Amino acid sequence: MSDEPTDNASGADESAGGTQSAAGAPSANAPEGTGATAPHVLPSGAQVTTAADDADGAKGVSRRGLLTGVGIGAAVVVAGGLGGWWFVKSQDTGTATAKGLTVTKSWADKTLTLTTPSGVCDAPLVIAYEKGLFRKAGLDVVLKKAGTDEDLTAAVGSGKYVASNGIFFNYLGPIYNGTPVKLSGGLHHGCLDLYVRNDGSVPHVSSLKGKKIGVSSLQGSATNFFSLDLLDAGINSSPDAKQVEWVVIEQDLLPQALKDKKVDAIATAGGYLPIIQGVQEGWAKEISNNRTLSDNAEYPCCAVVLNNDFVSQDPVTAAKLVTAWAEGSRWAGAHLEETARIESEKSYVAGTPEEILPVLKTLTFNPSPENLKKSLTPGIKKFIKTGFLPAKTDASALADKAFADLGLNF
């Protein structure tokens, strides 16, 4: 997943993400006498209908203008489960609005750079890109590899990338400290795992007090999430408390470090195949995850993190990006075998489809900005107790600061 600030992402050729207008000729089957064309269906299932008797019709409104939300005409979007959007141009300010969203500077025709997927659980982004869901939404998306040791949160905040993804706990500290990013669109559950040797040395999470836990980053998804499990077990996970020792090890070396007893447990993200093979071989076992083995599994992982300028200037285009990303999640969940094949053949994941498929089956593809929004305040309240956020943090205020309300009600 693209949520580890120090991980080296890998993926497909950037050239695949060319521009494609969300165009479509008006249907010849529009009902007679209605003064409207037949609806154009977006990949989300939303329907766009242009009114023939629109007062602005003579001004040459293009279908692309309607879909990007910056055309002079008006369009009605009726989206099953996504809410209705109404685009209209203000005669005074020249801005466009969509169900209360205001566009002050359009990003509709800009190239949107996202971080290249790097793990099995990045399937929603892989599918949205490879199946052309971004292009069908009228978005020009390209994928760019993150550099080794690159701070992805800071890079998104600076605008180097328009968006990335990762568990929302990763971004709370940076947002608290002023990094200009926003969260939206929880994408799925189930991609974080805590492993120990299968020798009885650590039978439960509570047995980790005084032990060493290997992680690829102190700011990564696994560190942040399993700090909650440690908290539930009565262990203060803060490095200052010294009740556990977090040992930073390169991702590729984590399984061997556990096997060689250099650490007592390892926490991983993204469905890491080598340690899963260790479980299959019998020398490793899983004692927690964010699927079924943790009381904190209710919190979504792999939320979308967005550049704040992008969101504040053009929330309409931001909403389309999040919606297409969510569609990729739903498609992946409904087509696991093909998703595994695409991740393997396009070199997003260094594994065969047969190795990737079992990992995909452990994920719950249930994209939901609403679920993320509801999870933020209680999640932050609990996360404060781990010591990774200041004790004085106002959870509700931080949740409001972190969440980008893009009018998406799924």
Image (cartoon, helix red, strand yellow):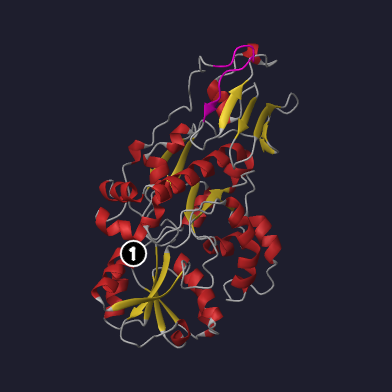
SS of the residue under disc 1:
loop
**Placement of the N terminus among the 4 image quadrants:** bottom left
Q: Residue at x 48, y 28 (%)?
A: 22
Q: Is residue 184 left or right of residue 352?
A: right
Nearest to the observer: residue 147 or residue 23? 23
Q: Is residue 59 left or right of residue 194?
A: right
Q: Is residue 142 above or below residue 264?
A: above
- The image quarter containing residue 211 is bottom left
Picture coordinates of residue 343, whole percent (x, y): 31, 50
Residue 386 visible to the viewer: yes
- On whether residue 161 falls in the magenta region, the answer is no
- On whether residue 37 falls in the magenta region, the answer is yes
Mark 1 residue crowding within 10 angstroms, few (<14) / some (14–19) / many (20+): many
Q: Is residue 248 above or below residue 43?
A: below
Q: Residue at x 50, y 69 (%)?
A: 225
Picture coordinates of residue 247, whole percent (x, y): 40, 77
Q: Which residue is mark 1?
A: 272
Give the extent of the magenta segment.
Answer: 30-41
Picture coordinates of residue 205, whole percent (x, y): 46, 81
Q: Is residue 42 above or below residue 291?
A: above
